[in-house]
Amino acid sequence: MRIAVAATRDGRALLVDPAGGLSLDVERERLPDEIARLEAELRPRWVWRETREWAPELLDAGVRVARCHDLRLCGAILASSAFVDDAGRSAAARPAWLPPGPAEAPDLATAVNPAQSGHRSPALFDLDVDVDPGGGPSRAVGLPTARELIDEHDRQLALVDGSDRRGALRLLMAAESAGALIAAELHAAGLPWNRAVHERVLEEALGPRPAPGRKPARMEQLADAVRAALEAPTLNLDSQADLLRALRGAGIGAESTARWELREHDHPAIEPLIAYKRLARLLSANGWSWLDEWVVAGRFRADWVAGGTATGRWATAGGGALQLPKAIRRAVSADDGWTLVVADASQLEPRVLAALARDPAMAAAGRGRDMYRAIVEAGVVATRDEAKVALLGAMYGATTGDSGRLVPRLARAYPRAMALVDRAARDGEAGRSVTTLLGRSSPLPPPRWHELQARATQPDATQVDERRARAAAREWGRFTRNFVVQGTAAEWALCWLAGVRNRLVELGEQPERATAADASGSAFARIPHLVYFLHDELIVHTPLEFASAVADAVGDAAAEAGRLLFGEAPVEFPLNLVTTPNYGSAT
C-alpha cells in the first residue's frame, strides 16, 4: 500500500491512502510518532514530493521508514527516459509544483567544456558540486495537496506501465528512492570523525595553526623558496595570473600551473611550488576552517545529493565528502566498541561494460581475479598499467598517446564491449541520446551545440567552423560513450546500497549494549549503519560483535545487485572488504 505525505499551509501534515480509506490530519510535531506507528503496522510505501522535505525531521526523532517513492527524483528520470512512450508523457504533463531533479538543474547538469568549441556538456566527471538542496525558486510554486501527490504517483506509474521495459524502470525508481532515503540517513548519522587526529595531520603537514589572516609556517617557507628561485620577492603565489607571469619571466614557458605541466620543466622553483600548491589545497579543502565548520560533536555530516549528476551519480552540497584526501581519512575513526567495515567494488565500470555488452571474453577476464592482470595474461597488452590505460581510454574516449595506441588491441580482443561504447559515442556525435540498462537517458545537446553543427554545413562555412563542429561532436560523443557505463554502474551501486541497508536493518539491535554510537542519533545509536558512500565504495559503522555479519551482508548485497541488473550474466562483482577502526588504514 501507499501513503501520501503532504504539508499544509498552516504547518500541519496530511497522511492519505485513498484506496485504504486512511486520512489523517496531524500536527507536525506528532508526525514522526504517527509515521512510526503506520510503518510498524502497515509497512507502506511513503509517497512524497521529495525525501529531503520529510526524512530529516523523522530521523531527528529516531524514525526510519523502509520504502518511499520520491516523486521529484523519479519524475526527473521519467521526463527524459527513452523507455517511456512520448505520447503518454505528453498526455499527462509533469505538474508545476514538482521541482526539477538535481541533475536537471543548469548548474549541476552542465559544465564548461574545456575545449574551445563554445558549447557546454553534462558534468559527467564532476565529483563534488554545490547545489541548492531545496530545489531553488521552483518551491515558490506552491504546496501540493495529498490528492495531487497521489495523482502524480499514478501518472508516473502509468508511464512505467506503458513502457515495454517496465521491470527495469520500476527497479530504477525503487533504487533511486532508496538512495534518497540513504542520503538523508548518511547526513543524520554522520561520519565518525576524530578531531584530534585531523588536527595532528594538519600540524604534521602545515605546522601549527596560524593566526587569522596568516599562512601556515610550512607554506610561508615554501612560498619564500619559490619567490627566491623566481627572483620575485613580492609574488603572490595564490594569484594564477601573477604566478604565470613570474614563471614566464624566469624562462619557464608554462601555459598553466597544473602539476603535470610544471613537472615538464627543470627549474629550482618547480618542486617548492608544487609542494606549496599541494598544501594550499589541503588548507582550503580540509584545513582548520573546514574542521570548525563541518565536524560537530565527533561527526562530519555532509549534505548528500542523490541522483545529483546526469548519470545518476551522487553529488554533495558542500563539504567535499566525495574528495577526502588519503591523509585526512586517518581522522575517520570508529567510536569505542565499534568498528568500520569498508568495502569497494573492484574495477566496477569495466565489469559493468562486460555485463552490458555480454562480452564473454571480457567477462572471463574479470572472473575471480584482477581484470587488468587478466588482460595482460591474455596477451592483449604487456603490462597491468597498459591494461588500465587502455580500458579507461576505451570508456572515456581517449584517442591520443598510450590510450590511442592500446585501444585498438582491446577492440580485437573484446569486440562486443568495444562495439557498445563505440556505438554510444556515434549516437552522441550525431546528437542523439543514450540510455543506461535500467532506463536513465542522457540529456540531448544544448542549442549551442546544434548551432555549431548547423553552421558547419552552411555554404559559407569556414575551416574554423568545421573544426569547432567536429570538436563539439567528439566531445559529446565522449560523454555518451561513458554515460551508458557510468550510469549503469551507478544503478548497480544504488541496488548495492539498498541491499546493504535492508540487511543491516535485519541484523537488529541489542538494547542492553554498554556502548552506543550516541553521536549518530537515536535512529542509529545501537545498530550497524551506513556512514559513507563514494560511487563504488561504502563504509558501515558497526558494533564490534556485528562486524563479521556486516561484512557478509555487504558481500551478499553486491552479488544480489549483480543478479538484479544482469541476471545470470557470467560477470562477477568482487569487493575489497576491510574491517578496521580507522578509514585511513583501509586505503
Image (cartoon, helix red, strand yellow):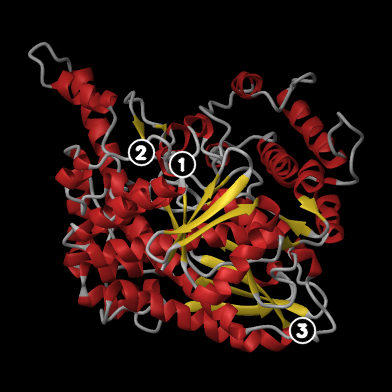
Is disc 2 placed on a helix, strand or loop?
loop
Give, as a three-letter code, the residue at label 3: Pro
Q: Residues within 10 Å of mark 3 (few under 14, many from 20)?
A: few
Q: Is residue 287 left or right of residue 305?
A: right
Is disc 3 placed on a helix, strand or loop?
loop
Q: Which of labels 2 and 3 is toward the front?
A: 2
Q: Nearer the viewer, residue 464 or 14?
A: 14
> Which badge, 2 or 3, comes first in the chain's sequence?
2
- Say if 211 sits above or below 421 in the image: above
Label 2 with label 1: CB-CB less than 8 Å: yes
Residue 342: give x, y in percent of width and height. 61, 73
Label 1 with label 3: CB-CB less than 8 Å: no
Say which residue label 2 marks.
95
Residue 113: give x, y in percent of width and height. 39, 32
Give, as a three-letter code, the residue at label 1: Pro
Residue 581 visible in the snapshot: yes
The residue located at (50%, 74%) in the rendering is: 42
- Compute the Cα span from label 2 to label 3: 45 Å
- Say if 28 sits above or below 338 in the image: above
Residue 500 visible in the snapshot: no
Say which residue label 3 marks.
511
Q: Is residue 328 left or right of residue 119?
A: right
Say which residue label 1 marks.
144
Q: Which of labels 1 and 3 is toward the front?
A: 1
